[in-house]
């Protein structure tokens, strides 16, 4: 009978009850989304690059090296010599070593010069490798492979001729317009900085800088695109090296060996470790997001309790009737609690539904545009945990109207004082 | 037959017996209710005449076990309810009493049938659907009303449903607090007649409180609360 009374009483106030359920549902959906996105962002960030055991660059800060070599943020303080690359590649522990060279850009997108092995060994989010949406890897000196976002934003397709700019500023005054490149491949979205990268071969990078000294063209020397092909296009310098090892056990040994190189000031970092260090510096944002989600949930619960409190006056008679029939005061208390629990449980269920539905609807477009594959099942242990916390807080809050009616039921007796 | 058994025999015929009962509201220096001695025999219908302020709400709340007097003995069906814990008082009220108010006797959003069966819930009495329908018919209500929501009924119908609810679990004592004040004269007389007919059948004791002296003629005895309550 307690259930029947609680249920019919809620149905009787269906409009305000529905609003309360809906606001709780929205707050639950927000809490779950924030948590889910936080989790996914962290995961996809920490997995921006995987499968690469070491990244080698000129000696500077660890985070700095990671930022420019993986995220294309900032600049290398120094280059490393081609000889050092050869030496590292020749180490017996090394399975593969991919040289990368940075420094140019195209309409604000960074240019990364590398070798074709890059497309083979680069991994992101566990074992995903790069794949081509269109076209193929670069073959000629002036071939270019675009990241998905570059192609999408600039509306480029295979065959498009592009001109690279010297330097990384959005607007560059020095253009390599004597040696235009041609788009031969477009990569699929990965959700990593690869999407924003313009890939060329090391030879291409070398070719456009032939006859340059100290970062500017030497006056009087002009080598056209055709002539450049006949020159030796082996680079003298590169920016960084991605290194894959035969056996992970040798990671620290090789790292130490590289850090101790006498010939050149080199530094090797473990990308995974530095990535999580970098994420740590951003945990303030995470906390603020969680705080906002928590406050939204709190507001929804307070709204519901306000609704319950506002009905106390109307319910005095109802309580008097129940008491006269012999309902113990704790029945009144349970009735209010049960109504609150029903509202919150329905709110949580609806909220989870909204959240799940939202994920299902947005998943295809998110994975298309950002290459982020959100977890197929967004319901995790933390979903249950958050729901439980919200339910407990609601039960604690509900003690207020429940206690008020409980006391009223003891003091007012059988007659309602108007 | 000695005196003791005589007293016991007498007590067994009493529905209500109050002695030296004094009730004070918190912080009050004078009692609101002060009853020296009052007995009601089982099966009697008693008209309690009381104007507002004569302490009738207090008296009814004490009899129902909701208010507790600071002093005295309140025996109901041979049980001193003052000694009972609150939960037991609630259960005692559920089992042995039926209460009818002036108005708003029903939970508005429950159906008529649910309202009537509410008394069963707390008294744990076992009554069948047929018994309920029979009772409803005897009170002059149509069976079709049972599925309707209580707030869709007229005041007169609601008061009859209240009687059905108060009687359904066959309690020994019926407390009616001005149940006719919201009714017009004709329905009022009919209502009292129906109430008394039904309670006679069950041999229940009826306490009927009103400020309308004209109704006294329907009842076995009349008590003037102004005289009974020595506090005023």
Image: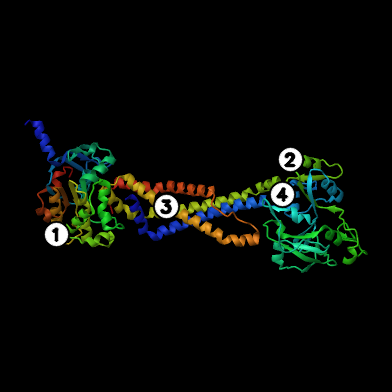
Q: Nearer the viewer, residue B21 or A260?
A: A260
Sequence order check, earlier mark of 4 and 3? 4
Q: Estimate how packed mark 4 is, as few (under 14), some (14 to 19) or many (20 or more) residues with alpha carbons within 10 Å.
A: many
- Name the chain under label 1: B
State which tag comes first along the sequence, 3 or 2.
2
Q: Which residue is mark 4?
A: A51
x and y percent of residue B62 in the render? Answer: 22, 43
- Residue at image point 31% right, 47% down: A409
Say which label, 4 or 2, has the lower sequence index.
4
Foreground mark, 1 or 4? Answer: 4
Q: Secondary structure at mark 1?
A: helix
Q: Give residue B85's position: percent from left, percent from top.
A: 27, 38
State the residue position of label 2.
Answer: A249
Q: Label 3, on which residue? A: A305
**Count the marks: how many?**
4
Residue farthest along the left direction in this orientation: B1
Whole-angstrom CA distance, mark 4 to mark 2, is 14 Å
Report how far apart the C-alphas of labels 3 and 1 lie in the structure.
45 Å
Specify whether disc 2 shares its chain with disc 1. no
Q: Secondary structure at mark 3?
A: helix
Say which chain tag 2 marks. A
Say which chain tag 3 marks. Answer: A
Question: Residues at badges 2 and 1 in contact (C-beta under 8 Å)?
Answer: no
Residue B25 at x, y percent in the picture: 26, 42
Cα distance, mark 2 to mark 1?
99 Å
Answer whether residue A395 is visible to the viewer in this image.
yes
Quadrant in which the N terminus of chain B is drawn:
top left
Mark 1 sits on what residue?
B190
**Label 3, label 2: how many angstroms apart (C-alpha)?**
58 Å
Q: Are marks 4 and 3 on the same chain?
A: yes
């Amino acid at each position: 009978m307690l259930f029947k009374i609680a249920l019919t009483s809620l149905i009787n106030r269906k409009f305000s009850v529905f609003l309360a359920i809906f606001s709780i549902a929205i707050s639950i959906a927000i809490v779950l989304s924030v948590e889910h996105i936080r989790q996914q962002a962290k995961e996809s960030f920490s997995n921006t690059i995987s499968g690469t055991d070491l990244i080698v660059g000129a000696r500077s800060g660890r985070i700095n090296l990671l930022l420019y070599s993986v995220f294309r943020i900032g600049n290398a303080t120094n280059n490393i010599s081609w000889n050092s690359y050869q030496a590292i590649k020749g180490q017996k522990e090394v399975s593969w070593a991919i040289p990368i060279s940075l420094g140019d850009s195209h309409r604000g997108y960074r240019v990364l010069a590398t070798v074709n092995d890059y497309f083979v060994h680069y991994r992101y989010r566990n074992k995903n490798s790069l794949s081509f949406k269109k076209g193929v890897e670069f073959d000629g000196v002036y071939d270019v492979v675009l990241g998905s976002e570059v192609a999408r934003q600039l509306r480029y397709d295979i065959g498009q001729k592009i001109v690279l700019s010297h330097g990384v500023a959005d607007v560059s005054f020095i253009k390599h317009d004597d040696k235009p490149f041609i788009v031969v491949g477009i990569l699929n979205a990965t959700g990593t900085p690869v999407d924003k990268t313009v890939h060329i071969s090391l030879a291409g990078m070398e070719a456009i800088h032939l006859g340059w000294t100290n970062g500017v063209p030497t006056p009087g020397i002009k080598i056209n695109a055709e002539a450049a092909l006949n020159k030796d296009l082996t680079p003298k310098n590169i920016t960084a090296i991605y290194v894959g090892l035969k056996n992970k056990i040798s990671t620290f040994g090789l790292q130490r060996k590289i850090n101790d190189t006498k010939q050149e000031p080199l530094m090797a970092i473990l990308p995974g470790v530095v990535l999580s260090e970098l994420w740590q510096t951003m945990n303030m944002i995470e906390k603020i997001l969680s705080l906002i989600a928590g406050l939204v949930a709190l507001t929804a619960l307070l709204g519901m309790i306000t609704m319950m409190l506002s009905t106390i006056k109307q319910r005095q008679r109802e309580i008097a009737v129940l008491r006269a029939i012999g309902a113990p005061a704790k029945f009144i208390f349970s009735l209010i609690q049960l109504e609150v629990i029903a509202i919150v449980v329905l709110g949580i269920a609806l909220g989870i539904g909204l959240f799940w539905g939202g994920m299902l609807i947005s998943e295809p477009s998110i994975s298309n545009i950002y290459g982020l594959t959100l977890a197929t099942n967004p319901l995790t242990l933390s979903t249950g945990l958050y729901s439980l916390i919200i339910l407990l807080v609601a039960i604690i809050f509900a003690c207020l109207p429940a206690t008020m009616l409980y006391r009223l039921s003891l003091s007012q007796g059988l007659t309602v004082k108007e | 037959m000695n005196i003791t058994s005589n007293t016991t025999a007498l007590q067994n015929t009493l529905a209500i017996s109050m002695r030296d009962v004094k009730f004070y509201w918190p912080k009050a220096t004078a009692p609101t209710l002060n009853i020296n001695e009052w007995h009601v025999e089982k099966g009697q219908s008693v008209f309690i005449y009381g104007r507002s302020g004569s302490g009738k709400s207090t008296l009814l709340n004490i009899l129902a076990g909701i208010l507790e007097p600071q002093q005295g003995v309140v025996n109901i069906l041979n049980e001193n309810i003052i000694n009972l814990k609150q939960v037991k008082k609630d259960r005692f009220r559920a089992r042995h009493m039926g209460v009818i108010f002036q108005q708003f006797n029903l939970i508005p959003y429950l159906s008529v049938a649910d309202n009537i069966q509410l008394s069963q819930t707390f008294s744990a009495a076992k009554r069948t659907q047929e018994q309920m329908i029979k009772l409803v018919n005897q009170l002059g209500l149509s069976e079709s009303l049972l599925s309707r929501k209580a707030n869709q009924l007229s005041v007169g119908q609601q008061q009859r449903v209240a009687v059905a609810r108060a009687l359904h679990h066959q309690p020994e004592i019926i407390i009616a607090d001005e149940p006719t004040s919201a009714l017009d004269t004709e329905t009022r007389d009919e209502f009292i007649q129906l109430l008394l007919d039904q309670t006679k059948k069950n041999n229940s004791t009826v306490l009927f409180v009103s400020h309308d002296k004209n109704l006294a003629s329907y009842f076995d005895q009349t008590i003037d609360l102004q005289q009974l309550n020595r506090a005023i």
